[in-house]
Amino acid sequence: MENFEILNALILLANFVIVPAISYGSQLAIAALGITIVYAVLRFSNFAHGDLMSFGTMTAILFTWLFQSLGITGGVLPTALIALPFAIVVTALLCLLIDKSVYRFYRKQKSHAVVFMIVSVGVMFILNATVRFIIGPNDRTFFDGEKFLIRALDFKASTGLEEGLTIKSTQLITVIVAIITMLLLFYFLQKTKMGKAMRAYSNNEDLALLSGINPDRVVMITWIIVGALATIAGVLYGLDKSFKPFTYFQLLLPMFAAAIVGGIGNPIGAVVGGYIIAFSEIMLTYAYKKFFIYLLPEHLEPSGLTQFLSTDYKFAISFIILVIVLIIRPTGVFRGKTI
Amino acid sequence: MNKYFSSSNMTGGYGGVDILNNCGIEVNQGEISVVVGPNGAGKSTAMKAMLGMISLKSGEIILNGKDISDLTPEDRVAQGIAFVPQTMNIFSELTVKENLEMGAFLRNDNIDKTIEDVYKLFPILKDKKNQLAGELSGGQRQQVAVGRALMTKPSVLMLDEPTAGVSPIVMDELFDRIIEIKNTGVAIIIVEQNAKQALSIADFGYVLVGGKNKFTGKGSELLNNPEVRKAFLGG
């Protein structure tokens, strides 16, 4: 029986901590990649990124509804996956429009990064209002298709364990889409001429100009990538949980924390940072009572919830990590740029 | 008769202050022109003006008989003028090979042969091709910087104090390589603080003072000119 106790404890942990943290971490990683690329190439902190995600997700929802009304569905997969490419195109076009009408003016003026940051707050408000105006502020689920990959009851029945493991299909979709996205992005940045030019421009703008790299083109490609990353991150998060504009705005803090913890401006750092933040957030707000009951002898069992922080305070965790990293290692885990 | 790449009557500077006062620098293909002079004489400014990084009040810049005074720096690079800045002259977060590839960004043909040529000129770069350029020593960084500039297969190479901050041995080595580049038919302009060594490899020298051409002449002539020696070469 002793072995089963340990297995039960591990399944419990996998079900409530590991699986959710991997999928939330993947979503944060893709979102943080968008932030870190804007910071690396365009040299400012884009506070509009959360609401850009919200806009991208809204567009995907609208396309999902359109396809559903036309009778097109994804079968066992969510229809939103078919809508995703269309939403990416619309969001990327929006990014280019915003850049042309807003950011380019400040780039020509060679404005300070702080000015850009404040401008991005303005863009954030506009996007925020636009999304609420079009789709409303309410919570929406737009998931369809097969909901579970592994159900808790089936798992219990087939293994005979007391604890069940649930894996939602959205969690697997999140991980697969995130891995494909990251591989494509890293291939682009490391192997293609344009990707290398983006890194060169980010590293030494003057020398990039002397080498004949066209800055307008670099900026354009950057916004297209950022629009795509924001839409993918937003849709994955919305599928897994639900879409609510305010939640996406709130995601700014963990997203920035992920980018900064990993080393802002460093794409690998953004990915690692995403998982660090996700795991810390979930591990520190999980109540371990049942876990210890499985593992410890009866007289040592905890009477309380053994929860470090209530889930209401999950944003405080990103904040604490952010502060600690900025004090101890401002360049982040991987050598990024200091803010 | 103008030389292959020449500037004349250049006047201008940053903002309202004129750093250059009617100065001119010329160079032929397969020759080295060296620009020396005291600090603040406008040596680097003259070079930047020839690349188009400074808007001049007057003056004209001729490349191969064509007036390029109105072209942007990027267009002049496309016309075959390569420039190695004094500082920040490499992509420190890119590998050595990627630095070279970025130098050839404007080219659409196969660049493998040019990369091999650069490796032949600077063999150490081949050994370190996958290392980040920012992790190399000062002399090696200068080699990356010159190599990057050579990737466009330029007809003119301009170097802004290439030996600043490197050891005397590395400096001699670098000058040897520059002579090798010259021998392939490239026109080279060098701005230098190490006036004696630079003039000794120069076909033609310019001593700039206060933005004006104070002395011009063959490198060896300037080295033996007592006035120049006294004022700029420490006797």
Image (tube, coloured by chain):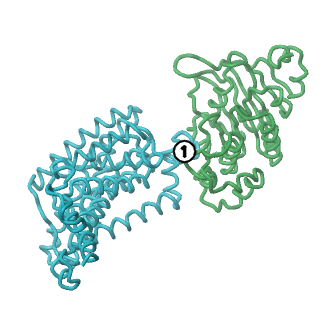
Q: Colour of chain A?
A: cyan
* Residue A313 % position (x, y): 18, 47
Q: Is residue B67 left or right of residue B121?
A: left
Q: For mark 1, does the 10 Å Cα neighbourhood hold few (<14), some (14 to 19), or many (20 or more) residues?
A: many
Residue A101, quarter of picture: top left
At a point 83% along the width and 46% down the height, the residue shown is B183
Q: Is residue B114 left or right of residue A199?
A: right
Give the residue at the far front of this rendering.
Answer: A299
At a point 22% along the width and 47% down the height, the residue shown is A315
Tell me if residue A251 comes above or below residue B108 in the rendering.
Answer: above
* Residue A191 % position (x, y): 52, 61
Residue A10, quarter of picture: bottom left
Tell me if residue A330 comes above or below residue B20 in the rendering.
Answer: below
Pick whichever, A13 or A72, lies toward us.
A13
Residue A239 visible in rendering: no
Helix or strand or loop: what does disc 1 sit on? Answer: helix
Residue B205 visible in rendering: yes
Tell me if residue A249 comes above or below residue B230 in the rendering.
Answer: below
Which amino acid, by three-letter code, is at mark 1? Ala
Q: Quadrant of the N terminus of chain B?
A: top right
Q: Quadrant of the C terminus of chain B?
A: top right
Q: Colour of chain B?
A: green
* Residue A246 % position (x, y): 15, 49
- Chain ID, mark 1: A
Q: Is residue A230 left or right of residue A41?
A: left
**Residue under pointer 1:** A208
Residue A165, quarter of picture: bottom left
